[in-house]
Image (cartoon, rainbow, N blue to C red):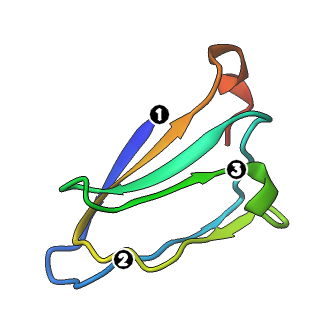
Amino acid sequence: MANRFSAPEASSLNFLISGLNLPEGAEMFILSKDGRIIHGPITGDVIYDHVYASDIIESQDVLMVVKCKKTSFKNFQ
Protein backbone atom coordinates (compact mmCIF):
# COMPACT_ATOMS: atom_id res chain seq x y z
CA MET A 1 0.00 0.00 0.00
CA ALA A 2 1.35 3.44 -0.88
CA ASN A 3 0.13 7.04 -0.68
CA ARG A 4 1.75 10.13 -2.14
CA PHE A 5 1.66 13.52 -0.42
CA SER A 6 2.69 16.78 -2.05
CA ALA A 7 2.92 20.38 -0.81
CA PRO A 8 4.59 22.41 -3.60
CA GLU A 9 4.98 25.54 -1.45
CA ALA A 10 6.49 23.71 1.56
CA SER A 11 10.17 23.33 2.39
CA SER A 12 9.51 20.23 4.51
CA LEU A 13 6.76 17.88 5.63
CA ASN A 14 5.97 15.99 8.79
CA PHE A 15 3.02 13.82 9.74
CA LEU A 16 0.88 13.17 12.80
CA ILE A 17 -1.08 10.00 12.08
CA SER A 18 -3.83 8.97 14.48
CA GLY A 19 -5.79 5.74 14.45
CA LEU A 20 -2.78 3.86 13.09
CA ASN A 21 -2.56 0.13 13.65
CA LEU A 22 0.26 -1.75 11.92
CA PRO A 23 -0.09 -5.54 11.90
CA GLU A 24 2.69 -7.49 13.60
CA GLY A 25 5.71 -7.66 11.29
CA ALA A 26 4.54 -4.74 9.13
CA GLU A 27 6.86 -1.84 8.31
CA MET A 28 6.04 1.67 7.15
CA PHE A 29 8.46 3.93 5.28
CA ILE A 30 8.28 7.60 4.31
CA LEU A 31 10.41 8.35 1.26
CA SER A 32 11.19 11.62 -0.47
CA LYS A 33 10.21 11.65 -4.13
CA ASP A 34 13.85 12.00 -5.19
CA GLY A 35 14.81 8.97 -3.05
CA ARG A 36 17.42 10.85 -1.01
CA ILE A 37 15.49 10.63 2.28
CA ILE A 38 14.19 7.36 3.69
CA HIS A 39 12.45 7.48 7.06
CA GLY A 40 11.86 4.03 8.51
CA PRO A 41 11.29 1.23 8.98
CA ILE A 42 8.50 2.40 11.26
CA THR A 43 7.10 -0.53 13.23
CA GLY A 44 4.41 -1.03 15.85
CA ASP A 45 7.09 -0.55 18.53
CA VAL A 46 7.15 3.23 17.91
CA ILE A 47 3.39 3.75 17.60
CA TYR A 48 1.86 4.74 20.94
CA ASP A 49 -1.91 4.71 21.52
CA HIS A 50 -2.38 4.31 17.74
CA VAL A 51 -0.63 7.66 17.09
CA TYR A 52 2.61 8.22 15.16
CA ALA A 53 4.48 11.52 14.75
CA SER A 54 7.15 11.57 12.05
CA ASP A 55 10.37 13.50 12.02
CA ILE A 56 10.65 16.46 9.66
CA ILE A 57 11.25 15.32 6.10
CA GLU A 58 12.98 17.94 3.98
CA SER A 59 11.00 17.42 0.80
CA GLN A 60 7.90 18.78 -0.93
CA ASP A 61 6.83 15.36 -2.21
CA VAL A 62 6.84 12.12 -0.26
CA LEU A 63 5.61 8.60 -0.67
CA MET A 64 4.33 6.71 2.37
CA VAL A 65 4.64 2.94 1.91
CA VAL A 66 3.48 0.09 4.14
CA LYS A 67 5.02 -3.35 3.72
CA CYS A 68 3.17 -6.27 5.27
CA LYS A 69 2.31 -9.89 4.64
CA LYS A 70 -0.57 -10.39 2.25
CA THR A 71 -2.44 -12.31 4.96
CA SER A 72 -2.06 -9.35 7.37
CA PHE A 73 -3.25 -6.65 4.96
CA LYS A 74 -6.87 -6.90 6.16
CA ASN A 75 -5.64 -6.01 9.69
CA PHE A 76 -4.00 -2.79 8.51
CA GLN A 77 -5.79 0.44 9.40
Looking at the rendered structure, the kind of residue marked 2 is Leu
Q: In the rendered view, does 39 fall on the left or right side of 48?
A: left
Asked where in the image residue 5 lies, by quadrant, the reply is: bottom left
Closer to the N terminus: mark 3 or mark 1? 1
- Crowding around mark 3 (Cα neighbors within 10 Å: few <14, some 14 to 19, many 20+) is some
Which label sits on residue 43?
A: 3
Classify 9 as above or below 48: below
Looking at the rendered structure, the kind of residue marked 1 is Met
* Image depth: mark 2 or mark 3 in front: 3
Q: Could you tell me which quadrant the C terminus lies in?
A: top right
Q: Which residue is mark 2?
A: 13
Q: Residue at x 72, y 43 (%)?
A: 22
Q: Residue at x 62, y 16 (%)?
A: 70
Q: Quick one: 18 or 54, which is closer to the camera? A: 54
Q: In the rendered view, does 36 fall on the left or right side of 67?
A: left
Closer to the N terminus: mark 2 or mark 3? 2
- Measured in 3D between alpha carbons, the distance from the residue under mark 2 to the one under mark 1, in whole angstroms, is 20 Å
Q: Which residue is mark 1?
A: 1
Q: Residue at x 36, y 77 (%)?
A: 13
Looking at the rendered structure, the kind of residue marked 3 is Thr
Q: Provide residue 46's location: percent of width, then percent of height.
A: 75, 62
- Measured in 3D between alpha carbons, the distance from the residue under mark 2 to the one under mark 3, in whole angstroms, is 20 Å
Among all residues in the image, which is located at the extreme top? 71
Q: Secondary structure at mark 3?
A: loop
Q: Provide residue 72's location: percent of width, then percent of height.
A: 72, 23
Which label sits on residue 57?
A: none
Among all residues in the image, which is located at the extreme right? 49
